[in-house]
Image (cartoon, helix red, strand yellow):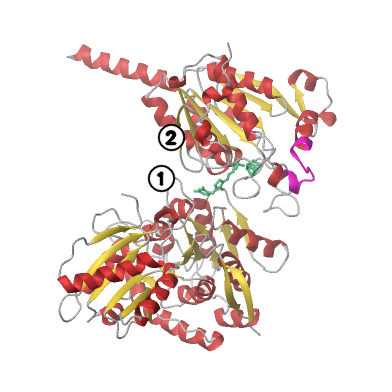
Amino acid sequence: MSRRVAITGNEAIAEAMRQINPDVVAAYPITPATEIVQMFANSVSDGKVDTEFVTVESEHSAMSAAIGASAAGARAMTATSSQGLALMWEMLYIAAGLKLPIVAPIVNRALSAPINIHCDHSDTMGARDSGWIQIYSEDAQEAYDNLIQAIRIAEHPDVLLPAMVTMDGFIVSHGMSNAEFLDDDVVRGFIKEYEPKHYLLDVENPITVGALDFSDWYFEHRRQVADAHTRVKDVVLQVAEEFKGISGREYKLFDGYKLDDAEYAIVIVNSAAGTAKTVVDELRAKGLKAGLLKIRLFRPFPQEEIVEALSGKKAIAVLDRADTLSLMGGPLYIDLRAAMYDSPGPRVKMVNYIYGLGGRDINMEQIAGVYNDLVEIVKTGEIKRSVTYLGVRE
Amino acid sequence: MAKPITYYLRTDKMPHIWCEGCGHGIVLSAVLRAVDSLGLDKDDVCVVSGIGCASRAPGYLDFDTLHTTHGRALAFATGIKTMKPNLNVLVLTGDGDLAAIGGNHLIHAARRNINLTTICFNNSIYGMTSGQYSPMTPTGKMATTAPYGHIEEPFDLCELVFSAGASFVARGTCYHANPLSKLIAKAIAVNGFSFVEAISQCPTYYGRRNKMRDALVMLDWQKEHAVTKRAASRLSPEELKDKFIIGELGTRTRPEYTERYESIIKAATKETDDNV
Ligand SMILES: Cc1ncc(C[n+]2csc(CCOP(=O)(O)OP(=O)(O)O)c2C)c(N)n1
Ligand code: SF4
């Protein structure tokens, strides 16, 4: 029987990790992700999991240990946030390049400097080109469900890529909400035993991992990583379909909210989507055709599906909780504009709002203001500013 | 004449973040009294820290201060010192910051013998992230990541840093606050890498888990377990077993890094000048 509980995001992730029962977890504490590993460590010391838990001396070592364990055939996990993820950067590329299906929950937090412990998406957005699959979660339930599904996605023989599942620091990681947990047996039946095909210490079939690979073969091997990404979308949908069977909860590549007949759309990830949906409801009640698209799978980017869902809209606002400092807007916006270049029909007007850096709140009036701006843009046919910093003191 | 401690503080940044009974404030005041006793001008002192409860200290100090990333204070400080060799550069850091994530920088700064003064606020725990064991947690002690007792051996940081090449190493405690301050003053005056391990207390995470309910009990523990070198020489190995030695633990004279750098530049420029 599944259990309904009031729970924080960190508790939900720690519970998913307990149920996943990975072979190896290597981690280093960092706010606001510390609790995940702390609670998981309790499961280890209470004998509730069979995991080898390695307390390393930095995140760089945590990811290195996870890579070593995964290369040796283990189901390996870690968890971190912000500076911790930044310190893993060198290793992120190695995990992806070696096609090791490590799964890591990441709690989104701003990057230094200045020093800040609150939510924005600079950390995972900074890792968007590392070759990891990225799945974003609006709340604790989604984070729990996504983490369990990520194991299947990452380990799928057509994929074999590392995957990170993100949720918003403090807002979700420490905020209490209702969630439903599956039974241990159900989760374990769903994720199955991990059976790697190639691994170190398989004395019958010795392999070399991470070998020198110059201009002769490097290109082909990197191309294979890209190739694996082309198969992710289908696997994500297959796994979601099966997950629906055990949970009743439906997941797709992205989530459309009152999007089909919408004329004005916001594109967003993670917790602020919840606030935005309430605004959509209010505007709909006033007769405005507002809608929302919340991206779940951000890497690889589901271009065709998103373009199809957004084509024909009158205007789109992309809300980014991170900046690229390229002066072309946030990472979601830049990708979305590139994707929409191929959209059929007249070019859709698109603008970008960068919000919430370092944990700055975003409220319903601000989001309603964004929809108003879209209406204005359509009315006048004019975009005054393509990138706006929302809620900042100028 | 000694200046009041507030002269060196950004009092508008108070209240500080430290818990009641935390030893870090005592170590900080020992640092400030050391700076004061040497009569250093505020503008000639630069304070660098990493991340952690200890590393919050520079935020409250009215010097030029640099608050960096977890573990990297010594690397930042090395940059400052090479650019401005005349500055007194102090590095304030926690045992996790310095000996875990930043351990590599520590041994190399000592090996180079660069004229920085590092003060390690050693509370044997990661305080800021709520009590995981650090490389300084004694064997058998409890931490959130060692619920049945810690199975690793801690570093002897003073021995490590001296072996790596430092010019000066010393150890003091919060309980022995005045001697601690004198050790720090000596360390600042040394021309080379100088290191002071200041035994601090974290009643919130270390004390609570290790049957030391409050700061007073922890200060008492420091008093009872610290022995001077001279007292130690009179004790048997058995009696010394759970004691630690305080005071100056190592001094040596070695060429200092920025001076060597300066002289190699001079030598190299002279050679080129001669060739012209
Ligand atoms: C790269 C990185 N990893 C982890 C952290 C989280 N973190 C902040 S302080 C700290 C430990 C602090 O312990 P210590 O240096 O002993 O200082 P104390 O808080 O005990 O004074 C950790 C792990 C971080 N800020 N950056
Ligand atoms: S947690 Fe420990 S080290 Fe940090 S301020 Fe509190 S007592 Fe001091």
Q: Is B147 above or below relative to A3?
A: above
For badge 2, the amino acid type reads: Phe
- Ligand 2: give its quadrant: top right
Q: Nearer the viewer, mark 1 or mark 2?
A: 1
Q: Which residues are magenta?
A: B207-217
Secondary structure of the residue carrying tag 1 is: loop
Q: Position of residue B113 (x, y in %)?
A: 49, 24
Q: Is B80 above or below relative to A262?
A: above
Quickly name the residue at label 1: A113
Q: Pinpoint the chain carrying mark 1.
A: A
Residue A101 is a magenta residue? no
Q: In this view, which residue lies farthest toward the front?
A: A286
In this rendered view, identify the residue nearer to me: A351 or A39.
A351
Instruction: Give me the residue at 51% from left, 36% from top.
Output: B13
Q: Position of residue B30 (x, y in %)?
A: 62, 24
Q: CA distance from mark 1 to mark 2?
A: 14 Å
